[in-house]
């Protein structure tokens, strides 16, 4: 079950977040282009002008948004670790600077 990472169009941010995720999970994240979906991402990027990332906590067989949607407990635990590590790294103050 590989983690996915949706990158912004700013490579320094993509590298920063990918590094953070890899340090926490000891796995190489998959970096994908920004995808559409049920998230209101355009509100943040287009209306508010904010940069965004998407760190999904799922896997291909989860039946996301279906009546039988599920998530294994070990994946939930990893999701908590990933987000804790990401927020920890953000709070450490070593984030990339905007151009």
Image (cartoon, rainbow, N blue to C red):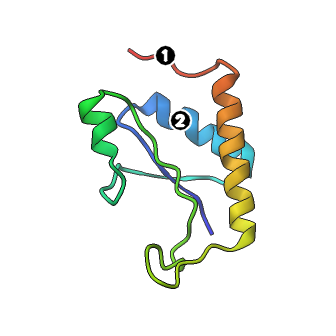
Residue 59 in the image: state x and y as whole percent. 55, 70
Of the pair 11 and 75, the residue shown nearer to us: 75
From this view, report whether residue 82 is shown above or below residue 68.
above
Residue closest to the far left: 46
- Judging from the image, what secondary structure is the residue with disc 1 in? loop
From this view, report whether residue 62 is shown above or below residue 96.
below
Dot 2 alpha-carbon crowd within 10 angstroms: few under 14, some 14 to 19, many 20 or more: some
Residue at 63 percent across and 69 percent down: it is: 1
Using residue 67 as the reference point, say whether residue 35 is left or right of it. left
Question: What residue is pinned by disc 2?
Answer: 15
Using residue 34 as the reference point, say whether residue 73 is left or right of it. right
Question: What residue is pinned by disc 1?
Answer: 97
Residue at 54 percent across and 77 percent down: it is: 62
Residue at 75 percent across and 60 percent down: it is: 77
Of the pair 35 and 26, the residue shown nearer to us: 35
Residue 99 in the image: state x and y as whole percent. 38, 14
Residue 81 in the image: state x and y as whole percent. 73, 49
The numbered mark at residue 80 is: none
Q: Total label count? A: 2
- Judging from the image, what secondary structure is the residue with disc 2 in? helix
Front tag of 2 and 1: 1
Of the pair 85 and 15, the residue shown nearer to us: 85
Q: Earlier in the sequence, mark 2 or mark 1?
A: 2
State the CA–CA distance, disc 2 to disc 1: 13 Å
| Quadrant housing residue 75 | bottom right
From this view, report whether residue 66 is shown above or below residue 81.
below
Residue at 53 percent across and 80 percent down: it is: 61
Using residue 36 as the reference point, say whether residue 79 is left or right of it. right
Tell me if label 2 and label 1 are in contact, CB under 8 Å.
no
Residue closest to the far bottom: 68
Using residue 58 as the reference point, say whether residue 47 is left or right of it. left
Residue closest to the far front: 67
């Amino acid at each position: 079950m590989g983690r996915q990472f949706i990158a912004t169009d700013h490579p320094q941010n993509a590298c920063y977040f990918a590094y953070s995720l890899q340090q926490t999970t000891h796995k190489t994240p998959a970096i994908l282009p920004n995808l559409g979906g049920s998230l209101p991402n355009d509100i943040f990027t287009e209306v508010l002008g904010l940069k965004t990332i998407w760190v999904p906590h799922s896997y291909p067989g989860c039946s996301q948004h279906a009546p039988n949607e599920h998530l294994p407990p070990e994946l939930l635990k990893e999701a908590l670790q990933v987000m804790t590590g990401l927020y920890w790294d953000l709070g450490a103050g070593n984030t990339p600077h905007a151009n």
